[in-house]
Amino acid sequence: MRRADSLVCLACRRDIVRGALQVSAVVGVLLNVINQGQAVMGGLPIAWSHVVMNFAVPFLVSSYSAARNERGVGPRRGSATECTTEAK
């Protein structure tokens, strides 16, 4: 549980939250246009739970990715970073 706690603490850092909110704003708007554009244009009811999820999922994915990166998981075997290091 200690690793999960540290990941959650990292994900709650101001810089990570700010970046995740920016990603969520852009991706969430795009997803809502794609998923509910016809409903909005046609005057149909909007699925508000979908609106929330279209913003929440990119926020959570971005936060998790940034926190994991900050925690220093490091490159995995066969990753692009490893290839770049070998080329030097």
Image (cartoon, rainbow, N blue to C red):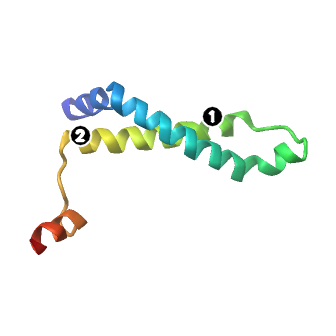
Q: Residue 60, image x and y in percent? A: 45, 38
Query: The N terminus appears in which quarter of the rendering?
Result: top left
Tag 1 or tag 2, which sits nearer the N-term? 1
Q: To which residue does mark 2 refer?
A: 70
Which tag is nearer the camera, tag 2 or tag 1?
2
For badge 1, the amino acid type reads Val
Identify the image quadrant of residue 79: bottom left
Q: To which residue does mark 1 refer?
A: 52
Mark-to-mark CA distance, 2 and 1: 27 Å
Residue furthest toward the front?
88
Nearer-the-camera pick, 49 or 14: 14
- Residue that appears at 19% across and 48% down: 73
For badge 2, the amino acid type reads Glu
Q: Residue 52, image x and y in percent? A: 63, 34
17 above or below 25?
A: above
- Residue that appears at 56% across and 46% down: 27
**31 left or right of 59?**
right
